[in-house]
Image: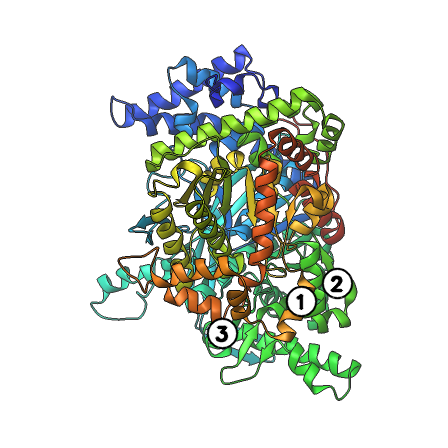
Amino acid sequence: MAKPLTDGERRKQISVRGLAGLGDVAEVRKSFNRHLHFTLVKDRNVATRRDYYLALAHTVRDHLVGRWIRTQQHYYERDPKRIYYLSLEFYMGRTLQNTMVNLGLQNACDEAIYQLGLDLEELEEIEEDAGLGNGGLGRLAACFLDSMATLGLAAYGYGIRYEFGIFNQKIVNGWQVEEADDWLRYGNPWEKARPEYMLPVHFYGRVEHSPEGVCWLDTQVVLAMPYDTPVPGYKNDTVNTMRLWSAKAPNDFKLHDFNVGGYIEAVLDRNLAENISRVLYPNDNFFEGKELRLKQEYFVVAATLQDIIRRFKSSKFGCRDPVRTSFETFPDKVAIQLNDTHPALAIPELMRILVDVEKVDWDKAWEITRKTCAYTNHTVLPEALERWPVSMFEKLLPRHLEIVYAINQRHLDHVAALFPGDVDRLRRMSVIEEGDCKRINMAHLCVIGSHAVNGVARIHSEIVKQSVFKDFYELEPEKFQNKTNGITPRRWLLLCNPGLADIIVERIGEGFLTDLSQLKKLLQLLSDEALIRDVAQVKQENKVKFSAFLEKEYGVKVNPSSMFDVHVKRIHEYKRQLLNCLHVVTLYNRIKKDPAQAFVPRTVMIGGKAAPGYHMAKMIIKLVTSIGDVVNHDPVVGDRLKVIFLENYRVSLAEKVIPAADLSQQISTAGTEASGTGNMKFMLNGALTIGTMDGANVEMAEEAGAENLFIFGLRVEDVEALDQKGYNAWEYYDSLPELRQAVDQISSGFFSPREPDCFKGVVDMLLNHDRFKVFADYEAYMECQARVDQLYRNPKEWTKKVIRNIACSGKFSSDRTITEYARDIWGVEPSALKTPPPSLPRD
């Protein structure tokens, strides 16, 4: 087999990465050497790999700053409606390559670095991921920032600059072990601290009501220091801003408490305030009601709203005064999107500022707040919904509790007027949940305080209307919308899969990179022998490359001609990694039973992090590694079946494994995965999907044709019917011999000979209290996997299905998603206009 091109060699062939003009290359080299020189003059005489990386990062950053300043200037002059995307997570991954791609600098940098005797890919590997997110919700926010910049929207991402992001996962003796992610250890060349915009945030204290109004007194103050990161659009000279807040103690922190001689202790106690931005809570789809988390949520909201109002007041146009004084036009100039309920405090905080500080009357303030805010729901799992204890809330945010009570009272009065005597409805719809521990239901607060509520895939948005927020939907049906998630094709095709991007550009040009629906043009080429050959070849090259990576990083050898069967996502019972395990064990048993039979060789890769406190998820990881220990060392099996646990799954690892995958596993119980976005990445990168009718899989099947995915299992209606009847796992265990054998092996310690009882708890859960009905879908899943094997035996037909899937993935661009948010929720139009580049003189 011909040695595959390196990504470096391939990049040079790709027009969309920016032609490496001699002038550009010379300029990059010159700038690189200048940055390197100044780094070394300061410190040492011998350069390390990191010095080279930083020199390149600063060189690329130099190309951003002029456009960044010009873009912000442009907004100040035009005074467009501004979009504020509030999220406690932004899962950005690495920045260097994405910046080069979006500025069209990749080839110039590649050539310049090559001429200097260095390897670009090697330097890219030095950058730490910005892991400020857990999974889907945080990565969605990152894709949205890319699309908002590419669509020329005046948009800002606001969040927290966590000192420690999502933990690094180590596997030790088959168990997950967490390590702190000290991602800022060597500094971050992509951020700019803005101490001149530092703002105070208040906590605790008490409330005083007087004829002059309401005062929140005796508070503890924490300062919010902003750090700005540029967000470049794709080749349009627009550079937006992501502003992340870091907590700082004020200089007089604890020192005015006249604690004689307590000076040292007081200075040490500054850490208490600064802990607010110390660490990302590592829970995905699970609510942990800790006071520090509530502090984080208020911290980001309070700092951000002060910033929003400052920008609204000082804006150049729309008012004769030097400063806007009326808030009438606020919703015409500001849109706030709440990414889940985590920033829900924006609603009472905006009310507090309008009513207490700006002296707007309550009804007007409420109208402004509702017109400004919109809420995206990300999950229907009850354990994920935020319900804060009133006692904690009252201690930390006493004024906000009063405001929430007032909002709720008016809301319930309204409901009672429409449904007189229906007290149960009032109980169901209240923001305050009565009980042993009174709680504030943040989702109800979001629905009441927003003018738009959306789910993230069609099926999810229907469930939101029909069950989770049914009462609210009956009250205001016009408020509820769907906005199916999407992914940015820049990072998730052009950056991570240059080979595939290249063969697509050769056939249909490069317009698809900003209008992904153009991939439909590939449908005319479904029988094009050359395209079929090229797509298959690029996939094989990606698999060879990933195999080499696995061997280098983890010392595992895999067969690159086997089917790469990939299941990567957070570990959670609802995502059913256990169903995949049962398939693997059954496959193993079939090989052992009849070793002479022809099997389609598979390399099963499972990866993802478990929340540190989620015992069952950690047991699932141990089960995967234990099955691997047995399967991978059984000489009868050979290289027909391998099970690999992909350690420390993260954005930069996704960029490597997704382009190499043949089969994408999306097998959540129908009705539990709100959307999924990994599913879209695999589809765009030439993997076929095995999945349930859940989340966006439903729309993927609709776009490509259900016969071009491997769809199996219960539908939402079937799950509901089973719940009505009562799910009994033992029925399946008793009637399916292969299932029984697999379960018995796991239970008896066949895969854990040194700890025979290791997986008793897992099996007990599956048999006696499995909320996600793994056994109910086992038989259909096994049959479906057999169809996968059958098609994989016919490489040409497999590749045709792959091409059809790629051609039909256009709907799943985050550009389409953001265009819908802009038109249907924010009331702005995306603009194809380029920002004037910094080289052009201003009018």
The disc labelled 3 sits on which kind of residue?
Answer: Phe
Q: Secondary structure at mark 3?
A: helix
444 relative to 587 in the view: left or right: right
| Among numbered discs 1 and 2, the one appearing first in the sequence | 1
Q: Residues within 10 Å of mark 1 (few under 14, many from 20)?
A: many
Pointer 1 residue? 447
784 relative to 817 in the view: left or right: left
Q: Residues within 10 Å of mark 3 (few under 14, many from 20)?
A: some
Quadrant housing the C terminus: top right
Picture coordinates of residue 502 (x, y %)? 60, 23
Q: Are marks 1 and 2 in contact (CB under 8 Å)?
A: yes
Q: Residue at x 35, y 63 (%)?
A: 748
Residue 681 visible in image: no
Pointer 3 residue? 393
Residue lying farthest bottom? 421
Compute the Cα span from label 3 to label 2.
Answer: 28 Å
